[in-house]
Image (cartoon, helix red, strand yellow):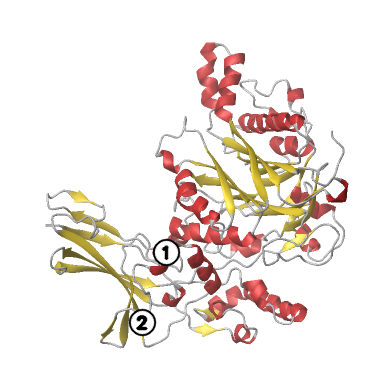
Amino acid sequence: MLSVLRVHLPSDIPIVGCELTPYLLLRRPDKTITTDDVPESAPLEGHFLRYKWYRIQSDKKVAVCSIHPSEQATLQCLGCVKAKIPVAKSYHCSPKCFSDAWQHHRVLHDRAASAVNENGNDEEELFGRFNSSGSAASLSGSASTTSLTNGSTPLYPAAVTQRSGGETWFEVGRYKTYTPTADDIGHVLKFECVVVEVETKLPVGHVNTILTSRVIPAPSPSPRCLIPVNGADVIGHLDSDGRVSSSGTFTVLSYNILSDAYASSELYSYCPSWALSWPYRRQNLLREIVGYRADIVCLQEVQSDHYEEFFAPELDKHGYVGLYKRKTNEVYSANTNTIDGCATFFRRDRFSHVKKYEVEFNKAAQSWTDSQLPSAQKKTALNRLFKDNVALIVVLEAKFSNQGVDNPGKRQLLCVANTHVNVHHDLKDVKLWQVHTLLKGLEKIAASADIPMLVCGDFNSVPGSAPHSLLAMGKVDPLHPDLAADPLGILRPNSKLVHQLPLVSAYSSFARMGVGLGLEQQRRRLDSTTNEPLFTNCTRDFIGTLDYIFYTADSLTVEALLELLDEESLRKDTALPSPEWSSDHIALLAEFRCMPRARR
């Protein structure tokens, strides 16, 4: 007969909006062991598994600490209550917790006060996109019907069983998987699994149960403002459609989201295991990405299975069309589903897809070795050059007018390159060669069409490095130390390390602009020698800038930039990733305007 041998949950702490899927170990009637589900629609020898989820509701109301959400709150900030800040942010587990968090907590009070002063009472704009209840509601809205109903119709009211000890059990789900809701916050969940006979519909054998810890709200990042860099002195807010009212501008997001395959507890031991789990991180990342409401989204380190099963369908619900290029797998030998790649999304109401180019650096390496090296040296060369990295280049056509009255009806094209140059820091020659190869490809596109260009991604190159110099300056100093090691001669002659694209780093605009609200604070978050952010990647062992958005300055101007984060605010959780931010990189976002120009 079918029997359940073991039941357990991969994560100890349930979080609002993040699926809970218990792990079941079963023994089939033929004595074989399996983890496959046995639903009523496909019974095994007259038996199937029945599941139930309950919320155990105590008569005593429990609040959860806003800083340590796995801890019960013991005090509440009355200043938050007075300022009408979302109540979940007001709770703390101890006086020390409150005092340690005060420097960051007081920012909530300041934001609320300024919102009231400027807008009468507009904390919804400041907090609404990311607060605990709002985020849970928006995720529920984008979830599948299965997630919404959690297996019972209707969800509430549900079967209620009164238990002794002042506890009430509310039935909340009848599927194997359950997604905690805001109503579950502070309560323990109970999962039941039992073998049931098909004919009688009666349980057979004992009921297997698990009790979770208390459900916690999904930590909510503070909203990041869009800072204008075009001389205006008013901080910009996204409108109800997520776009600035001017029809001639568009926004571009670049974000390395940290592949689940790389998010190990060994590398990121400072991040709580529940916050490092993919079910949690994917929802937090989706909430963040959707919240930015960018017109174009360039993501790196997107696993192929996560693109197909999660990001593509979820972002489709928010109006995005997606294109994807998986890394090649000559080097990577594990499950091909977990190989990551680059994903580019665009709003279907703002752009249409014209053309896609896929760059495989392994192919370029093969071509170079075939033409430049004798057979005896090819294997050694390819071992050095093959890194499986790719770039995705997309040509889009704008559905909005950029040209004004001078050029009515002229097509406005845009070329967007998205790449992840994931090369070991010792292989500086390979990293520079890949960036040079990408730029040469973009030059060919530029020669065939008068088209503005964006080059986005994680280049794994700090400001001042040879790849950064090539991108930003169009050339590399022949005496640059990065050129010292070139065992294959792929960089020779050094005079070839040039390109003609007028590329400028978007975030350097913070340094070039005059006085403006928010600009001085952002300048302090730039490196004054390179005019690049002090960091876009922040872990316990490294902090620095690796990510960039470059644009062709003869065809595009920067209107606004997403504010940079300060290191101190991130160090309260040691580093990235954290419960608040689910990648070890920060997102970059720029608003651009196309400008009329003479053909080059």
Q: In which quadrant of the rendered image does the N terminus lie? A: bottom left
Q: In which quadrant of the rendered image does the C terminus lie? A: top right
Q: In front here: 558 or 315?
A: 315
- Tell me which amino acid carries mark 2: Gln
- Closer to the N terminus: mark 2 or mark 1? 2
Q: Is residue 475 above or below residue 348?
A: above
Task: Write down the quadrant of residue 118 in the picture.
Answer: bottom right
- Tell me which amino acid carries mark 1: Thr
Q: Dot 2 surroundings within 10 Å: few (below 14), some, or many (20 or more)?
A: some
**Residue 150, percent from left and from top:** 37, 67
How far is the residue under mark 2 from the one under mark 1? 25 Å
Q: In front here: 124 or 515?
A: 124
Label drawn at residue 145: 1
**Residue 216, percent from left and from top:** 45, 72
Label drawn at residue 438: none
State the count of labels.
Answer: 2
Q: In this view, does 103 lie above or below 383?
A: below
- Please, what secondary structure does the residue beneath circle 1 have? helix
Query: What residue is pinned by disc 2?
Result: 57
Residue at the spot x=45%, y=75% of the render?
71
Viewer-side label of 2, 1: 1
Q: In front here: 350 or 285?
A: 350
Q: Dot 1 surroundings within 10 Å: few (below 14), some, or many (20 or more)?
A: few
Q: Is residue 447 above or below residue 136?
A: above
Residue at the spot x=50%, y=60% of the render?
283
**Residue 275, percent from left and from top:** 47, 61
- Please, what secondary structure does the residue beneath circle 2 have? strand
**Residue 559, percent from left and from top:** 79, 55
Q: In front here: 423 or 574?
A: 423
In the displayed structure, does residue 592 sit left or right of residue 185? right
In the displayed structure, does residue 35 sit left or right of residue 79? left
